[in-house]
Amino acid sequence: MRMRMEWMTEEDRIMFVIPVCPMSLQTSGKQMIIRKGRPLFFKTQKASDYQKIIRLYANKYRPKTPWSCPIRMVVDYYLPRPARLNTKKIPACHQYADKRPDLDNLQKGTQDAFQGFWEDDSQIVELSMRKFYCAVGERERITFDLIKLPHIINE
């Protein structure tokens, strides 16, 4: 289903790029230790630092007031190009990253950074994620496209 975007204004869309190498946070970057027979969960320093960087860049684009409508979120992850793709036989352009890390684990590392963009995570009604290997000479990054959607769907 294609939606017409005639209703959309500049305030209805937020697009930005974070120049960071995407990081997979399996189990949301948490580790567990057992103390006195009880499990204790804590976030690793690496995961915490990564999420701080994402939040730092994302905060520059946060709307003045949190959105209270349905939201479409499009996220593209550009991963480092593996050495196996650096041959003359393989084109130097972007390629889909069909190996690890898993796409859902990449999303775990970024979703917490958007506090204040919307009132509740349940407002995200469309989520599109893709992962690519960078083209030759490009830097790793994550691109975000957040779009306000109308409450009523005109078909």
Image (tube, rainbow, N blue to C red):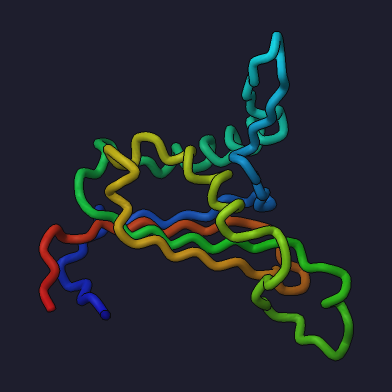
Image location of residue 17, percent across then percent down: 53, 55
- What x and y, as percent, mark residue 7? 15, 67
Residue at 48%, 44% (x, y): give it. 111
Q: In which quarter of the image is residue 151?
A: bottom left
Drawn side of residue 55 relative to residue 12, left or right: right
- Tell me the quarter of the picture where residue 2 sits: bottom left
> Is residue 63 found left or right of 115 in the rendered image?
left
Q: Nearer the viewer, residue 103 or 76?
A: 103
Q: Which residue, as the protein is rendered here, is positioned at the far bottom?
A: 89
Residue extending farthest to the front is 37
Placement of the N terminus among the 4 image quadrants: bottom left
In-front residue for pair 59/47: 47
Residue at 34%, 43% (x, y): give it: 121
- Give the answer, above or below, for where 131 lies relative to 57: below
Question: Which residue is at the front of the view, 60 or 50?
Answer: 50
Q: How many labels does the image show?
A: 0
Residue at horizontal 76 percent and vertical 86 percent from the top: 91
Closer-to-camera residue (59/103): 103
Q: x%, y% of residue 114?
A: 42, 40
| Left or right relative to 119: residue 86 | right
Image quarter where the C terminus lies is bottom left
Depicted 45 relative to depicted 153: above or below: above
Q: Residue 34 in the image: state x and y as whole percent.
A: 71, 18
